[in-house]
Each structure stands twice: as C-alpha cells, then as structure tokens.
Image (cartoon, grey):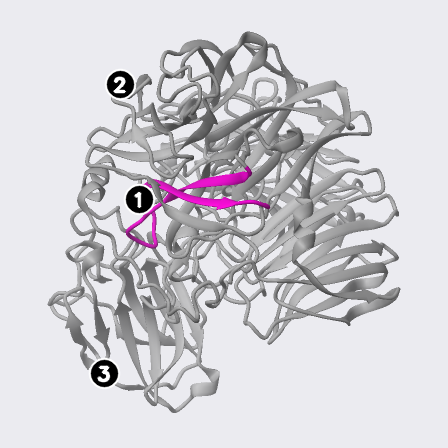
Amino acid sequence: MSPTTRPGRRLLTALTVLSGLALFAAAPAAADTLYHEQYRPQFHFTPAQNWMNDPNGLIWYKGQYHLFFQYNPSGNTWGNMSWGHAVSTDLVHWEQLPLAIPQDDNEMVFSGSVVLDTDNTTGFGTQANPPLVAVYTSLVKSTGVQRQSLAYSTDGGTTWTKYSGNPVLDLNSVNFRDPKVFWYAPTKSWLMTVALSDQHKISFYSSADLKNWTHLSDFGPAGATGGVWECPDLFPLSVDGDPSKTKWVLAVNLNPGAIAGGSGAQYFVGDFDGTKFTADDSGTYTPPSGTVLQDFESGSFGDWTAATNAFGGAPAAGALDGQSTVTGFDGTGLANSFHGGDASTGTLTSPAFTVTGDYINFKVGGGNHPHRVGSVLGDEPTPTGETLADFEGSAYSSPLGDWTTTGDAFGTRPAQGTLPDQQQVTGYLGNGFVNTYLNGDASTGTLTSPAFTIDKKYLDFLIGGGYHTASSDTPTAVELVVDGKVVRSATGANAESLDWASWDLSDLQGKQAQIKVVDANTGSWGHIDLDQAVLSDTQAQPHSDETGVNLLVDGKIVQSATGANSETLDWASFNTTSYKGKQVQLQIVDANTGGWGHVLADQFTAADKPALSVTQRAHWLDHGQDFYAANSFTDAPDGRRVMIAWMNSWNYGQTIPTSPWRSADTFPRQLSLRTVDGTTQLIQQPVSELDTLRGTTTTVPTTAVSNGTVPLGVDGTTLELRAELTPGTADRFGLDVRTGAGQRTRIGYDTTTGEVYLDRTASGDVDFDPTFSSTEHAPLALDGQPLSLHVLVDTSSVEVYAENALGEQVVLTDQIFPDPSSTGVDLFADNGTTELTSLQAWQLASIWK
C-alpha cells in the first residue's frame, strides 16, 4: 500500500478528493456476456466489475475459503479502497458477495488479515459464537497517516462493524501498513507481522486481545530493497514433508525493484522464536575472483579516456559536493559522474582489449536510466528539410498555413514552456511547442495541419507527454492522416522530455497528408507534447538519456547495465562468452541531466562466473511481472499452506485493456519446503483442486525439432500443460502457447545463460503501456538434464512452474492479451535441436456459469 509508488496515491491532497468522488463505473455487461468478455480469465478469480488489487483477509472458516480483496466499488481504476469479498468451497469456483468493509468519509480500508477469535479475546462475540476479526490498515484521508484498526463480524463474514476504539496501533506514519495476524500457540497470544515500508523493515507485535499491542522486534533491511516493502506474511512449513523439521517463511512484497523490475514478492527462510525472526541467509556475498581490468585505485583513470567534465580529472574518493553518501564501492576510488551535479554529462571509455573470459563483472550505481536501442549520444543536429511547423509564432500557423483546433486542450497559441502544475518540460526547440496540459490533464481536443505533399522519405518530429496509443479508446497521439485514414501514429512515453521520433514514408511518396495531434485522455498523463515537424531525407534518432555501463563491440553497444536510483553500488555482469577473442571496450555513460542523472562504477573484473546483484541473490516467489501482494490462507484444513497473489503490476495495472473489471488473482498455490543441493527452497504447485476443471486430454508423442517450430496438435485458450524437454544442441528451446494470428507467448530455456524465460513481446496487445512488452528470466541450471514444465494458460495469463532434475524450481507469471483466435501450442528450437520427451495437455473448464 504505497502512496509514493502506486498511481492515485502519490499526492496526499488527492486522498481528500477521492473520499467524496464517485469514480466512473463501467456499466455491467449484459447477462449473456458477463464473465465471458474478451480477456476475462476463465479459471482465475476476477470481480464481476471494477478495480481489484491486493488479496486480503484470507481465511478458511466453516467449510469455505474467504477471499477479501482491495476493491474500488465505484470504478475501474484505483480509488475509494474498500474490502470486496468472495467465497469458495474448493479454491476453484468463487462466488462474489456484497462489499464487506467499505471506506467512509474519514478512512480508506487498506490491506490486512482476518482471524477467528476462537476464545473471544476481543469480547466482540461470545464463547458460543466467536467473532471473525479483520485487522486492517486504516488510511486517514486528511493526513495520509496509516494505522492499524479492527472490524468484526458475528455472522460469518457477511456484515462487519468497525471497532469504536480504532485505531489499535498508530505510529503516526504514512508508511506503516498491511498487518498479517495469527494466533501463536506457544505464547497463547496474537502475533502481528506488519511493514515499515520505506524503512524496508518488518515489525512483529504481540497482543492478548487484538486491541493492545506490544512491539517485539524488527527484521530488515535484508534481501531486495529497491522499492517499498509491503504485505508481509509469516508462517511455518515442514521441510521435505518431515513434521519434526520445521522452518519459518517470511514473505515480503516489494514495489518497485523486484526481479522483473516492477512489483514482486521475495521470501526468507529461517527461524522464529516467538519474538524474533532470523533468516538462514546472512546476506553476505563474495563475488567470483578474476583478473581486475580497472579498479580506479591508482589515483588516475590510467588509459581510460574521459570526455567532458562529468567524471572529473581522476577517480572520486566517494561522494562529491552536494551528493548523498556513496557506498558499495571497493577500496578508495570509483568513477562518479556527479561532478557539477546531475546537470553534467560525459563518458569514460576504456581502450580496446581482447576478451578471454566468460564474464566481465563490475559494480554500478546512480540513476536508473537504461540504454535505449537506437538512441544516440550527444546533441543530434535538427533534421534538415521542409519544416512543416516549429510552433514559434503567436498562433498555430506554419509554412503550410493555419492549423485548426477542436476542444480546449490546445488553447489559441503554442505553449511557451512548462504550464502551471506541470512537471518541467525539456527537449523542445526554441520557445514554443504544442502542449495540451492547458488546464491540466482534464482538457481534450485535436490540432490538425493543412494538407501537404509527401515528397521526402521521413517525417521527423519531437514528441513527449502521455503514453496512450492511437488504437486506445482515449489516445494522446500524433497521427498521419492520408485519404482520411490514420497510416502512422506515435505517442509519448509518460515523460515531459520531448525526444525525436521518425516515420518512414517511402510507401507514401506523392500522397497528400495531414498531421493530427489528438488528446482524448483525461486521466494520468492525459496530454501530448509536439515540436519541430520536418519532412527530411534524414531519419532522426532519439537522444540517449542513459546512465550506465556499456559493452562495445566494433563501436556498437551489445550489452548494458544501469543503476537503481541509488548511491549504493551493486554487482552487475556482462556475458562475454560469444565475444571471446574479439576486441571490445567498456564505456561508462552519463547522458542524463534530470533527476538521478549520474552514474557510479567500480571494480571491472574478467571472471569465469557472473557476479550477482542483491536483487539476483534474493529469493523470489515468482520471477514474472504479475505476482504481487502474495498472501496465504489462515486455518486451512490439514495445515496446508495455500497462497494467492494479485496477478497484475503497479507499472501498468490501471491501463490493462479489460472492462468492466480490472485485475485478477493468481491460481491458488500450495506451498512446501524442499531441500535442494543443501539449501531449503520454497516450492509451489497449483492446488490439486485444479483437476476438477480438466476436460479433454491430449497426449503428444515424443517430438523433435531443429531450427524452427512444430505445431503439437494442442489448441485452447484455457489449458493445463505438463511437459518434459531434453536440451539437445539448441541455444534456445521450449513451448510457444497462444499461437496464431502472428502472435505467440514463448516459454523457453536459454542454454547460453542457463535461464528459463517467458517472452510476451509478441503475445497480442502489448502497446497499451510502454513497460508491458517484456521478457522475464529465471536462473535454473539443467546440466544437460531434462526441463520439466507445468503451465497454466488462461484467457489472459500464463503461469509457468519449471523444475530441473534436482528438484530446483522457478516460477514465472505474466499477463497476456492475445487475439481469441490465437489458440495453438508449438515446440520450438533455435540454432540447434531439441526433443519434447512428453506432453500431456488438458482443456480446462470455465469456473463461471
């Protein structure tokens, strides 16, 4: 529950607005389409309509699994947070019930847990009818303060009453949230696990009555700390099925900064003594040894060449003037481009050298601004040609004539800079440019050029603002219109920095065209910026704004790494196996003048094994993009531990193309602990009740493939797959699911990196947000042995459980939005051969009537 990272929670002033705002709610679908709309999951829980995020209050009670969840009863984006409610007898088929705990004028009801107060320690019920008690985070709308409160139910969770003595625990903090409470039998008391989110700590409290709490201890910082910590969960599990050998698992959700870059869930295995949790993993790390290429300890850059003054004349000894404390570097020196602050730019480049090892390891810190393929360093000259508009006049006039406007977004003249309440706008040329932030994001309209003849190969222009593509319902886009049709379009990148874009018009020579700027969006980033439209024979390239380290081969960037918006350096690694015997260079780059516009680097070492960052060394429940706010059921029968997570990400969660609902939960997973190569690992499997959905079964015989794909005769939008594949000679091999219509979601194994990967870049609709198109990776050594896959494919998601011969497991979960006709399953191999040893596939029935 992070107001600093989740859209809609960034400004405390917005909280007071939300309290009285009835957000737009999509009308319910007709009865014959409800639960069967495009992209609606068919065996994952979704609310009938409106926004959902974190699962809350998971408990088994009187034969039913109760799933409460963060819910907006009034709209399809985050806001008005209350507790929704659903129940199931089998963890598969769910019935949504009326709203459980609503927000009110004073508070929003954030995440928490539910317990059965068997002994009526609260006095909210009776010994004969003990109450269900919800312990939740109360968000005070007027201040943003987060505190822990109670509500109780004496009718099995149908209706709830907020405790008149709320709050029961208050630190006067805006980052204190998500209590998970359970009865701890050894001390006959309630135990609360709760997050101090911005401190990367989990606090433990004890209580006799759920009303009065005593602080016991804190855990953290530990593991991954690149984002806020949220939604903790603490529980015991037997190891290898032996009830006499028990370990405790502490799950901690993190946003952003998870292994896939956004939202995610890590876990720690250790011991809990009733007061304190101690992780087995101490967090200490010794990187692989090797040959030092540059450690910045000589007092000079040696034969490395510095361009401009960002890096100074010699290595830094730590933090520079105006910089926060720098940590994580080795010895006394490092490369630090904060000379002159974030406004300075420059490069530091090694001489060419021959690659002899498999990896180059190094430490990197500073800004998180990755290298963008196709971008160029330095100031690119303005493309020459026919200027269609530079927006420097006092009206929307140009060499073509006057441009026409509709709506209220453009006003009567170009903007002369940043508009009121707008973030600083950069990258435009001269004084004027198109900026539809007039009156904020709420304004809409169009700006259309006179007609012109396309007589050059490219149309180059500077663009910024919101990322809402022309194909979306509410675009912020620049369009090229020919014969009344949109033939090209571009959008911003949710940034106020304008950058070059270019359309290849080779197929449109001699045509009459118009440029149309469209702002139809009234939500977040609901505006567009445009400048300097030029017909040219030169294709403009976007400027680099990176801060990081690059590996150059023949002067071209082949690998790159960036910081994490942190002054603490961490390990990174380049795989140089394919470059052995070649000449390469290392280049440290600062091309950014904005926030965190600097880079830190140290300890370049050639080694036989990769160095791992803190994030890579953390233990992850899931390596995909769409697994967050993971939590487990309390009081489940037979002591089973079942976990559910929100199957979405805060990177793009509010823009996924679904209606009238938005967000689903993962399929429930049963957890266990397994010893693998001397280490205790958390193992996850879909709950066995999944079997009740199995329909038609297809068994595929042993199948080989070489340098291509082979259809497997399996089709479906809802499938369960169990497969075993033998590596062979291929560099990459695996399964493609939801194939057809030029689409596929690839579940692969890369033998060159030893990683399972899930590639959704061609999975269907990927253009609704700039962060969605992605490939996720998870390390899993095969050593020539088979790869076992257990895959769940739903209408708009893929969950992959992958294991090696030793029983080591990785899990990856991603949303996808394919065409309904994309239903195939293929076997693939790249640059070699592989064999599908076995495949069993089941069609899965819908859980919705």
Residue 259 image-quadrant placement: top right
Q: Earlier in the sequence, mark 2 or mark 3?
A: 2
Report if residue 68 lies within the magenta region. yes
Relative to 385, 703 lies left or right: right
The magenta stretch is 63-90
Residue 769 in the image: state x and y as whole percent: 43, 58
Q: In front: 128, or 170?
A: 128
Answer yes or no: is residue 45 visible. yes
Mark in front: 2 vs 3? 2
Q: Amino acid at mark 1?
A: Gly
Classify residue 156 as left or right of residue 16.
right
Looking at the image, which is closer to me, 604 or 778? Answer: 778
Residue furthest front in the image:
128
Q: Nearer the viewer, residue 251 or 756?
A: 251
Res 383 seen here:
no
Residue 797, magenta (yes or no): no
Q: Which residue is mark 2?
A: 165
Give the Cα separation between the discs numbered 3 and 1: 39 Å
